[in-house]
Amino acid sequence: AQRELSAAEKAYSSAQSEELLLCEKKQLLLHKLETLNSMNDRLHQLFTQNQESEIELENCTSKRQAEVSSECNHLNGEFLKLQNPIFTELSIRDTMEFDVPEV
């Protein structure tokens, strides 16, 4: 009975030691998980900020492209006017002094 008691005490002591090791390992893993979650939250925040900045940049780029296109169209139109002036756009003096032939 004494040997069985000694073996049981030894097994109990071994189980307690293993429990302590497992608790320490659990705490380390929980700390690591907390650190990873914190890093993941930060990365998600940066990703969201980058997406918002990208959308803002795309909007700004398309606005600038529209402005450039509008300015190019305006300049092309002015250039065509210089090359081919329309008669009504030429400056003609208004005068009331003219002879109307009698019929």
Image (cartoon, rainbow, N blue to C red):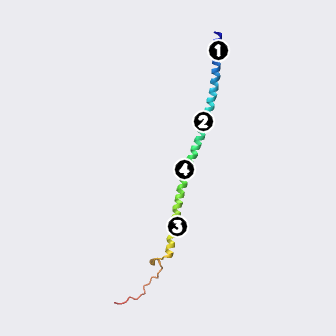
* Residue 45 in the image, given as x and y percentages of width and height: 57, 44
Determine which residue is flagged by label 1.
7
**Label whose residue precedes the other's in the sequence (2 or 1):** 1
Real-space Cα separation, disc 4 to disc 1, in angstroms:
66 Å
Q: Amino acid at mark 3?
A: Cys
- Residue 34 is marked as 2
- Residue 72 is marked as 3
The mark lying in front, picked from 4 and 1, is 1
Real-space Cα separation, disc 4 to disc 3, in angstroms:
30 Å
**Label whose residue precedes the other's in the sequence (3 or 2):** 2
Which residue sits at x=57%, y=46%? 47
* Residue 9 in the image, given as x and y percentages of width and height: 64, 15
Q: Amino acid at mark 1?
A: Ala
Against 18, is 90 above or below? below
Q: Amino acid at mark 2?
A: Glu
Real-space Cα separation, disc 2 to disc 1, in angstroms:
40 Å
Badge 1 marks a residue whose secondary structure is helix
Q: Amino acid at mark 4?
A: Glu
Real-space Cα separation, disc 3 to disc 2, in angstroms:
56 Å
**Mark 3 surroundings within 10 Å by alpha-carbon count, few (fewer than 14), some (14 through 19), many (20 or more):** few
